[in-house]
Image (cartoon, helix red, strand yellow):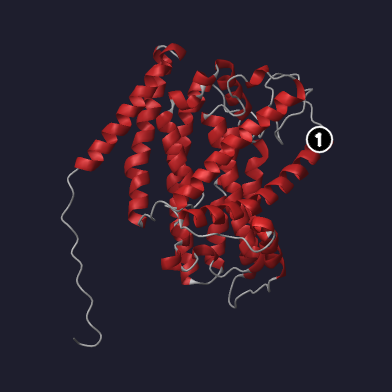
Amino acid sequence: MHGFSLWPTLITIVAVMGLILGVCAYLIYVERKISAWMQDRIGPNRVGPLGLLQPIADGLKFLLKEDIIPDRVDRLLYLLAPAVAVTTALLAFAVVPFGPTTTSKDRATYEFVIAPGVDIGIVFVFAVTSLTVYAIILGGWSSNSKYSLLGALRSSAQLVSYEIPMGMSVLGVILITGSLNLEKIIDHQAKQGFLGWNIWFQPLAFLLFLVSVFAECNRLPFDLPEAEQELIGGYHTEYSALKFGLFFLGEYTHMITTSFLLVVLFFGGWHFPGISLVPGIGGIVLQMLVFLLKMSSFIVFYMLIRWTLPRFRFDQLMALAWKVMIPLALVNLVCVMVIEQVGGAPWEWILLPLSLVVVVGAGLVAGYWPKGPPRRYRPLPDPLGR
């Protein structure tokens, strides 16, 4: 067991929570600006210079808005759901490193992670984030609304389905690095250099994990639980004021956590060629900036996808998970197991062309698979009798 110091941990928790709250507020600002740019609009520009004070105004609006609780709701569960959503999202960040760490037993230096040395870090993240479905189910069921209930049922099916390929895609990384500890996974990639990043050995796993993350965060093109054109707002239709804001805070915090996971698992964490040559505090700051830049690039990618791809139908969403992603994850896992059993590290480069072959083959099969007869829709009767 490593030594535990209370005050540095408490200071880290307070700093990280405050930073996440501020970052989430300005991520909404960035998303509104990106959507305005892609739609040839201006976006927030009235409150403060360049609209930079708009997130503060929105936060005050959530705090000061009238808190409406509809009749015939299950009051306890109705109030509990937003708290569960934001708590699980924040708790998952406890083991995710956001800066350089050390995997040695001597931990005299400051660790840029709330709970250092957790040997089952990935399992902890998956276990905590899977609890998010309870918040959505509780919110949808306790609202006593058909729209909210349909959104909650969609979300529960979506989360349960996409957690399977997400977990299976990470197993290949675990087999290659030999650890469930997120800090050791970064250290394994940093020791091998730029060509030792897991993205070169597990491109198929990265693709599966990335798609699963979109579904886990309820982001387009997988935002079926909130489909405004069909369900008004989905599971949070009946929520307002601060409770509505907590659901949004949980979603954006989940985006931050999963972006850090993508960087840790596949892109070397804080590592970048030549960065380890910078000594002292300057090197630590540079490593943190590299980490944050990688994470920010994934968040911007989330936002660009939202305004690029249309929403999937629900049957397409479920078919993608069960008929495409889970079989591909199984194939990837078997390939990694065979390579590790046969030769280990010298043979891991075979996984790169092998993954490309599997992806191209899956695309060809999907493109040329015989389709059933086209659906025939009976036209609705004209209400005017024409």
Quarter occupied by residue 8: top right
Q: Residue sitting at 41 percent across and 22 percent down?
A: 337
Q: Residue sitting at 73 percent across and 29 percent down?
A: 111
Q: Can you say whether 95 is above or below 136 in the image?
A: above
Left or right of 338? Residue 378 is: left
Quarter occupied by residue 73: bottom right
| Dot 1 crowding, Cα within 10 Å, few <14, some 14–19, many 20+ | few
Q: Which residue is mark 1?
A: 8
Residue 361 location (% of width, % of height): 26, 32
At label 1, the amino acid type is Pro
Task: Please state which of residues 40 and 309 is positioned toward the viewer in this rendering.
Answer: 40
How many marks on residues?
1
Q: Quadrant of the N terminus?
A: top right
Q: Quadrant of the C terminus?
A: bottom left
Residue 191 location (% of width, % of height): 59, 16
Q: Residue sitting at 19 percent across and 60 percent down?
A: 375
Q: Secondary structure at mark 1?
A: helix
Residue 366 location (% of width, % of height): 25, 41
Q: Residue sitting at 71 percent across and 30 percent down?
A: 285
Residue 385 location (% of width, % of height): 20, 87
Task: Please state which of residues 278 and 183 is positioned toward the viewer in this rendering.
Answer: 278
Q: Can you say whether 349 is above or below 96 in the image?
A: above
Q: Can you say whether 127 is above or below 2 in the image?
A: below
Question: Extreme right residue here?
Answer: 7
Taking the image as drawn, is residue 270 in sight? yes
Taking the image as drawn, is residue 126 in sight? no
